[in-house]
Image (cartoon, rainbow, N blue to C red):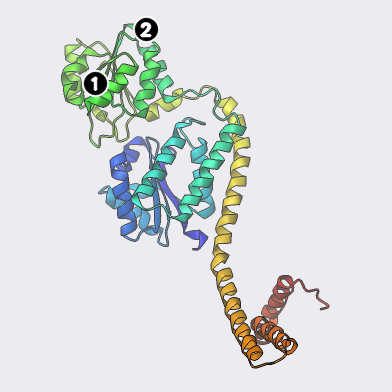
Amino acid sequence: MNTANLFAFGINHHTAPLAVREQVAFNTEATEPALRDLVSHGAAKEATILSTCNRTEVYCSTNAPEKIVNWLANYHHLQPSKIEPYVYMLPQEQAVKHAFRVASGLDSMVLGEPQILGQMKLAVKQAEQAGTLGLLLHKLFQHTFSVAKDVRAQTEIGTNLTSMAAAAVKLAERIFPSITEQRVLFIGAGEMIELNAVHFAARSPRHITVANRTLERAQILARRVNGHAITLSELPEQLALHDIIVTSTASQLPILGKGMVERALKARKHRPLFIVDLAVPRDVEAEVAELDDVFLYTVDDLAELVQDGMAARQSAVQEASVIIDSGVADFLHWMESREVVPTIRALRDQAERQRRHETEKALAMLAKGESPEKVLELLSKGLTNKLLHGPTQALNQVQGADREALLENIRRIYHLHSDE
């Protein structure tokens, strides 16, 4: 396969606002069907989709890169023109380097954050299960995870890290004098909510509630943080009872609408309501931010609060870049070596056919009683003539500058000096 077939396409927090990113996000359940759709339509031979709150990226092997953006738009029922201004297309070397940077935390909203590596590993697992992870992408992500491991082990990229969860707690402490007097509601039970629940629980809030689509998952997390579990259907009645709300679900539609929040504020007699929406697509309708007494923050809003320790981590970026550049060179060498494999195989197959043909002739001569010395002499001459016929014929047919180039290649292949 031509190495130019490797591409990375994406929309991330550098290129697009949240309102655009949420339109092309894939939840966990949708990823595998989407991968199969992408490959079955012939847009890609291999594909992996990485979808997080900060990015949606497609890593793929394709001969028609122009089809990928159209597929991404069409799959989400959008006009391609709506997302094209925000999409980056990275071929070959750029795609490899981007994958390494993403896995190492160098392209994250929070520089050095480790969560992206687990998200990328999940994306690869989903591609395996969907049957869209071929040799090229399998090798790419093997190298990606190895490079990311080296970056973590050999640099200080993860030191002095302020996480999104820690930032949410800091924000809440700006709004309320003390979290110990507040009632906290977590909507969802995934990894992001679990991280936030642990951080808030460390501040010993007055009460913790976990709401989830399935009560069993909510109960598991609630037990960890000494909280109470409810289902999403109970939110309209429960919302007004809480001061701090942190939400992150895989819902494609908002969980908290403007009307529901307005009713909660009325019941609270307009005591402030602090909401952190970490979901992409968003769990909270954007219009909620317009309500008085509501402090609504999204993942993009938290970005300004996660810069603590940035200077210390920036010094590690240069070291990480050296490791990444070395990894890129190694992977590109592997890709290039793949290109010559078919030619090497064909060359060996041709030589093997010639060897068998000459051997059969020699055995036939021996069977007729010819002397072994004569047979060996003819066998060696026959093999030599056959193996040198191709390069000799090519040299006789080529002219001008091409002849000089071919002569130089022949000398290099057969280790000849010019005077030979």
For the residue carrying disc 2, how many other residues have a C-alpha within 10 Å: few (<14), some (14-19), or many (20+)? few
**Which residue corresponds to the image point at 56% horizontal and 65% vertical from the top-left?**
341
Residue pictured at 39% horizontal, 23% vertical: 195
Q: Nearer the viewer, residue 18 or 124?
A: 124
Q: Earlier in the sequence, mark 1 or mark 2?
A: 2
Q: Cβ–Cβ below 8 Å for labels 1 and 2?
A: no
Q: Is residue 56 in view?
A: no
227 horizontally vs 365: left or right? left
Label 1 Cα neighbours within 10 Å, binned few <14 / some 14-19 / many ≥20: few
Callout 1: helix, strand or loop?
loop
Judging by the rendered image, the residue that carries numbered circle 1 is 291
Q: Nearer the viewer, residue 142 or 23?
A: 142
Q: Is residue 171 above or below residue 358?
A: above
For residue 356, the mark is none
Give above or below for 287 relative to 39: above
Q: Amino acid at mark 2?
A: Ser
Above/below status of 280 relative to 159? below
Residue 379, image x, y percentages = 68, 85
Give the amino acid at mark 1: Leu
Q: Position of residue 403 (x, y in %)?
A: 69, 80
**Is 72 placed left or right of 158 in the picture?**
left
Could you tell me which residue is drawn at 55 percent across and 57 percent down? 335
Q: Between marks 1 and 2, how big is the CA–CA gap? A: 23 Å
- In this view, 322 is above or below 298: below
The percent coordinates of residue 103 (x first, y second) are 49, 39
Q: Label 2's element?
A: loop
Q: Which mark is residue 178?
A: 2
